[in-house]
Amino acid sequence: MRHPLWPRRLRTGATALAAAAAAVALTVVPIGPAVAADNGEWAVVPTPPANAGPTPRLYFFLESPAGRTLTDSVRVINRTDTERTFTVYGADAYNTARDGGFALRQLTEKQSDIGVWTVVGAGTVVLPPKAQADIPFTITIPTNASPGDHIGGIVAMESVPGGRSEHNGVAVAVQRAVGARIYLRIAGPEMPGLNLADLDLDHPTPWLPTPVDGALEYTLANTGNLRLAPTITVTASGMFGHRIHQRGATPQLDLVPGAESRMRTRFTGLWPVDLVTATVTAKADGGVLTVRTTRTVVVSWTGVAALAALIAAAVVAWRRHRRAQVARPRGVRRVRAHAEVG
């Protein structure tokens, strides 16, 4: 299945890369609007082809049989008024273990896929203010590469740390990086798959009989060999079918094959004594569908005590009322009998 944005023709061979590397050019460009891989200071995007239409490429969509070498070009743009130096490299993509965010591995991390197969024509690029460079790269696909999607990117990382963060009260220098995603599909059987597991509704034990908040955690895994962007729907209801509201939006995911992430959805409106039913549905293109449901008891001990006291009070009141009803007719009969005898 060919993606509508995949290029129809790709140049192959290391010779093309060597020739293109010698032609890396710097050109002054005006500052334009931010694009997908753009932090406002620099951007990394696919180089537009000579006959580019009105819609630019935001990502690389490539396809090939195993054992081929593909050549393309990435554009690094310096949007600032100062000279910037960047380290450019190929990287594997992954999804974060918490919340499934899309990320590209750092230069110092171990690469095993796109990051190993990719060779960049210029590892270090110095860009004058308001300048850009088109940098060629090749992806050499091993002959034993597995069919399906292989996801990665071309990353431009600032050579000198330009950011600061604080960790345990200590200022830490941060090297920022921006990457253009690569979606490479290798010919062969396509087997999409999703799995949901380990649903767990976490909630505090409320001591006051008031509505409480909760959070549903679950594990979402891409078990197939295709990249998936699933639509996730989370619903919940309480005892007697009362509605429980979701807090915040459901994240938009881009799951690489083999990804497994722990997801979290927050709820509000749980009763202090409740039986909550929560259902997670994940659906993706290709007829992929998985559904899981869990039920959880919510108990407020003070709420239970208050409810027990209320029930006990109601029982006592009912018994007193019952006794009064039983005693009243007997008194009436005695009065009537005395009147008849007299």
Image: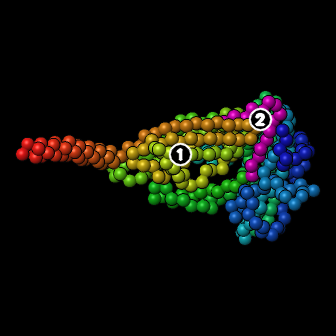
Q: Which disc number belongs to residue 148?
A: 2
Answer with the quarter of the image where residue 112 lies.
top right
Magenta-colored stretch includes residue 77: no
Report the residue at 75% width, 52% height from top: 180
| Residue numbers of the magenta segment | 180-194
Tag 1 secondary structure:
strand
Tag 2 secondary structure:
strand
Report the residue at 59% width, 57% height from top: 174
Question: Upstream in the sequence, badge 2 or badge 1?
Answer: 2
- The residue mark sitting in front, 2 or 1, is 1
Quarter of the image that includes the C terminus: top left
Residue 64 in the image: state x and y as whole percent: 85, 37
Report the residue at 64% width, 36% height from top: 290
* Mark 1, residue position: 236
Q: Which sits in the foreground, 89 or 196? A: 196
Which three-letter amino acid code belongs to the residue tagged 2? Gly
Residue 277 in the image: state x and y as whole percent: 51, 41
Q: What's the CA distance linking mark 2 and mark 1?
A: 35 Å
* 93 relative to 187, above or below: below
Answer with the quarter of the image where residue 114 lies.
top right
